[in-house]
Amino acid sequence: MAKYVRLCNEIYVTVSNKIGVLADISRVAEQLSINIEAVAGYATETDEARLLVVTFDNARLIQALKSKGYILIKEVEVLLIELENKVGSLEDMCSKLSAEDIDIKHIYGSTCPAGCPAQIVMSTSDNKKALAVLK
């Protein structure tokens, strides 16, 4: 079951798919002392890549990225979820959303050795309803 769930915004950046872009964005966050809570990325069929970044200080990071020439930036509402790190937790969460007819639009996450929660970032067809279901 979810140990913690809240609405937040994910920074969605479209960039040229080239070596060093994520290093550059990470460096900008580090120079501002902004911790990156979650990150995902993927290359597209074109020469672009998409980076999805969750921080607790998006406004300052977005401003700094724009000043460095990153222009295709938007914020997307997502859920930040901590799940118990045990067998069945993801299935339990997904089944609850499915039972309420909530579609998962995108999801990514990570875990660590036993004792630490799994951290999930997710966007759904109805984030506010999902928040209520998972609380």
Image: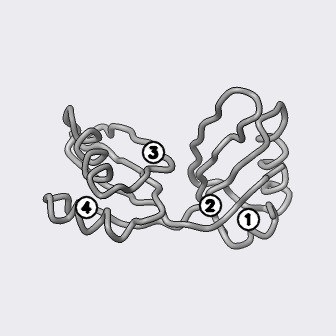
The span from disc 3 to disc 4 (Cα, nearest Å) is 17 Å
Q: Earlier in the sequence, mark 3 or mark 4?
A: 3
Q: Nearer the viewer, residue 103 or 111?
A: 111
In the rendering, which numbered label is found on residue 91?
A: none
Q: The disc labelled 2 sits on which kind of residue? A: Leu
The span from disc 3 to disc 2 (Cα, nearest Å) is 14 Å
In the rendering, which numbered label is found on residue 130?
A: 1
Q: Earlier in the sequence, mark 3 or mark 2?
A: 3
Q: Earlier in the sequence, mark 4 or mark 2?
A: 4
Query: Left or right of 6: which side holds 132?
Result: right
Marks 3/4 in contact by CB < 8 Å: the verdict is: no
Rate crowding at label 4 as few (under 14), some (14 to 19) or many (20 or more) other CA atoms within 10 Å.
few
Residue 20 location (% of width, % of height): 21, 35
Q: Which residue is mark 4?
A: 72
Q: Earlier in the sequence, mark 1 or mark 3?
A: 3
Q: Nearer the viewer, residue 111 or 71?
A: 111
Q: The disc labelled 1 sits on which kind of residue? A: Ala
Front tag of 1 and 2? 2
Residue drawn at (25%, 69%), measured in percent from left and top? Answer: 63
Front tag of 4 and 2? 2
SS of the residue under disc 1: helix
Residue drawn at (68%, 57%), measured in percent from left and top? Answer: 103
In the rendering, which numbered label is found on residue 79?
A: 2
Marks 1/2 in contact by CB < 8 Å: the verdict is: yes
Q: The disc labelled 4 sits on which kind of residue? A: Leu
The span from disc 1 to disc 2 (Cα, nearest Å) is 8 Å
Q: Nearer the viewer, residue 43 or 30?
A: 30
Q: Earlier in the sequence, mark 1 or mark 2?
A: 2
Q: Which residue is mark 3?
A: 39
